[in-house]
Image: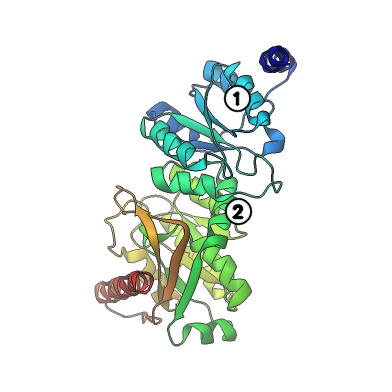
């Protein structure tokens, strides 16, 4: 029996190599993935359990043809996990053993070290025993602890849904916000770049529970903006592309039309590249042109990790306390002093952010 257990995965690897050689493979890389390969920046690949057979072969193939990097694979400590581990090693991959039910904490610490060393990791977020196509918290915890992005963005949306389901959420609505939802009167949500991770999930949640409306999101035309756009669409949100440096005028006209049709908009007034927590002119111009008020929106979480990025990006831990604070709507007259209006929006966002952080730390 031990001979069979030893040989079967190796023979399986050889058979899959032969199968792979017969396949007509096409590869669709989202913007940003190849750039991270070239930069040596680590990523976490997330693959459904039902699609894992060819993944070790695919990694070996893309290392030769596309500049991908060798991955470290997470396999459970079960007998099936032993077969998976031996199979992966047949493609010259490293393996870390553990799962949510056995050895998970040790495996998580090991994978944090692997990513910290700049190497890629592959996990099966619905493995080893399901439920099928339901993301478990481990991949979210790993991304939160390391800052490595989960690929692809749509699976990232699934991971954030799983994270959101574990959070203890409280919502603080300023007077006038819910009234505008009920009246169908559009608003412009302003959110700091460092607090955007959970915002698409929050909108989906509040549409079910509080009568909020579906928003249209503004994302830049950069590669990072493409990831944001795909991520937002994973929550059934519309996206308009543009920023102050590229496509801003077209995006502004499009958003004016969106608000004119009575729909809500969400913008990041210090994005896409800062300065951190400083309001740029676009949100004020949009409010002045449309008459829609700006609603400062902030989300706090504890425990959470703050990345060493320009925006101190907030990554809530699974099962964290979470607070969403909607500040009072800020109206901007067409002939208003734009600099003064920007300062008022900035102050509102600072106040909402401080309130959200106080609520989760109380």
Q: Give whichever of discs 2 and 1 has the lower sequence position.
A: 1
Residue 222 in sight in this render: no
Crowd band around label 1 with a 10 angstrom C-alpha radius: few (<14), some (14–19), many (20+): many
Residue 185 in sight in this render: yes
Q: Which numbered marker is on residue 234?
A: 2
Residue located 60% across and 76% down the image: 209
Q: Find residue 241 and report its horizontal and vertical position in percent.
A: 49, 54
Which one is in front in this view, the residue at disc 2 or the one at disc 1? 1
Q: Find residue 262 and report its horizontal and vertical position in percent.
A: 57, 76
Q: Nearer the viewer, residue 203 or 317?
A: 317
Q: Is residue 151 above or below residue 165?
A: above
Residue located 58% across and 57% down the image: 161
Q: Nearer the viewer, residue 157 or 81?
A: 81
Q: Which residue is mark 1?
A: 85
Q: Quadrant of residue 40?
A: top left
Q: Quadrant of residue 232?
A: bottom right
Left or right, 3 with respect to 174, comes to right
Q: Is residue 7 above or below residue 145?
A: above
């Amino acid at each position: 029996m031990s001979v069979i257990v030893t040989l079967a995965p190796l023979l399986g690897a050889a058979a899959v190599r032969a199968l792979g050689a017969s396949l007509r493979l096409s590869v669709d890389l989202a913007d940003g993935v190849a750039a991270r390969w070239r930069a040596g920046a680590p990523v976490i690949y997330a693959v459904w359990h039902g699609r894992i057979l060819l993944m070790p072969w695919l990694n070996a193939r893309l290392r030769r043809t596309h500049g991908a990097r060798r991955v470290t694979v997470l396999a459970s400590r079960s007998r099936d996990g032993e077969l998976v581990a031996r199979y992966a090693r047949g493609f010259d991959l490293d393996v870390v053993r553990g799962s949510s039910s056995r050895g998970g904490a040790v495996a998580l610490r090991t994978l944090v070290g692997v990513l910290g060393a700049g190497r890629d990791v592959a996990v099966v977020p619905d493995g080893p025993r399901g439920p099928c196509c339901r993301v478990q918290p481990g991949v979210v915890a790993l991304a939160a602890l390391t800052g490595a992005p989960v690929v692809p963005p749509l699976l990232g949306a699934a991971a954030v849904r799983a994270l959101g389901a574990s959070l203890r959420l409280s919502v603080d609505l300023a007077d006038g916000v819910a009234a505008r939802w009920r009246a169908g009167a559009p608003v412009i949500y302003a959110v700091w770049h460092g607090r955007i991770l959970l915002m698409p999930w929050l909108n989906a949640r509040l549409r079910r529970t509080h009568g909020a409306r579906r928003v249209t999101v503004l994302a830049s035309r950069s590669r990072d903006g493409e990831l944001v756009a795909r991520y937002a669409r994973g929550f059934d949100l519309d996206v308009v592309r543009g920023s102050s440096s590229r496509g801003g005028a077209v995006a502004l006209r499009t958003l004016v039309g969106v608000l004119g049709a009575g729909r809500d908009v969400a913008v990041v007034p210090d994005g896409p590249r800062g300065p951190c927590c400083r309001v740029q002119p676009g949100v004020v111009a949009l409010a002045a042109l449309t008459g829609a008020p700006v609603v400062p929106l902030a989300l706090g979480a504890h425990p959470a990790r703050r990345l060493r990025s320009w925006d101190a990006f907030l990554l809530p831990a699974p099962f964290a306390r979470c607070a969403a604070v909607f500040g009072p709507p800020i109206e901007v007259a067409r002939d208003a002093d734009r600099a003064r209006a920007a300062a008022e929006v900035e102050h509102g966002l600072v106040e909402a952010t401080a309130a959200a952080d106080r609520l989760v730390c109380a």
